[in-house]
Amino acid sequence: MPTSTAVLGADLIGTTRQLLAYWLGKVGDRGMPRKSEIDPTEIPALLPYLLVFERRAPDSFSVRLAGTAVVQRLGFDPTGHPVLDVIAPAARAPIRRALNRILDEPCGLLAHVRDRYASGREVIVEVLRLPLSSEAGEPRFILCSTIETTDPTVWRGPQDRPALLAELVEQAFFTWSPGPDGLPVLSSTGLRTV
């Protein structure tokens, strides 16, 4: 969706752009789609890069699902773990605030974060987070894509757990509204380096 790239002020990686276009196609004139509307058979190429978070309380989010590429990049499967337990300690409070904002406003978030491994490997990861509701319409889930901005084949060493996970480099929150043709229109202040 070309408008999305222009509005967010960044050249989105293909996976991010595809997930955003898919999600926008499901949102309609509502604040967010229901989790049940996300059909894995419609986006099989994206599944390895996806995560689903569930808000259990304002300070408690758990990982409900982690794709295979996410598990490989992290060096462990975070499914079932509290989201904040697998994040760098300094990033926990800002990420908790961001996750709540995504569900409460609602809004989306495009971010670039740094992961650093004990082996010396360091990568920048593009992260897209989008709100989903429960069947009852309660803002409760966050659909995420995470993909390295560098070629993962460059690193030929063994994969190890990150020593630093999700150090924020830049981020942009964005909103959407129905456009004149009925399609969602995004608005954002652009990426903000932190």
Image (cartoon, grey):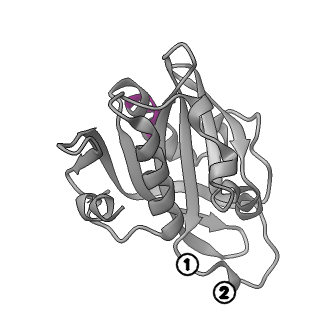
> Mark 1 highlights which residue?
150
Tell me where residue 53 sits by quadrant.
Answer: top right
The stretch drawn in magenta includes residue 41: no
Is there a contact, CB below 8 Å, between mark 1 and mark 2?
Answer: yes
Position of the C terminus, as image quadrant, is bottom left
Q: Residue at x 66, y 62 (%)?
A: 45
Residue span colored magenta: 95-101
Q: Is residue 179 above or below residue 37?
A: below
Q: Residue at x 49, y 17 (%)?
A: 137
Is residue 150 toward the left or the right of residue 41 in the image?
left
Q: Position of residue 138 (x, y in %)?
A: 49, 16
Helix, strand or loop under label 1: loop
Main SS, magenta region, reads helix
Q: Residue furthest front?
A: 181
Compared across the picture, whether 66 is left or right of 13 comes to: right
> Callout 1, which amino acid?
Thr
Q: Position of residue 46 (x, y in %)?
A: 63, 58
Of residues 92 and 45, the one nearer the viewer is: 45
* Residue at the image point whose x is 38% and y is 24% from the top: 104
> What amino acid does circle 2 point to?
Val
**Label 1, label 2: how far apart the Cα atoms are:** 8 Å
Where residue 161 sits in the image (x, y, percent)?
Answer: 75, 60
* Mark 2 secondary-structure assignment: helix
Question: Which residue bears the numbered disc 2?
Answer: 154
Q: Look at the image and tell me in which quarter the N terminus lies.
A: bottom left
Query: What mark, if any, has residue 121 been given in the picture?
Result: none
Can see residue 125?
yes
Picture layout, residue 121 above or below residue 80: below
Look at 27% across and 60% down and name the residue there.
Answer: 3
Figure disc tally:
2
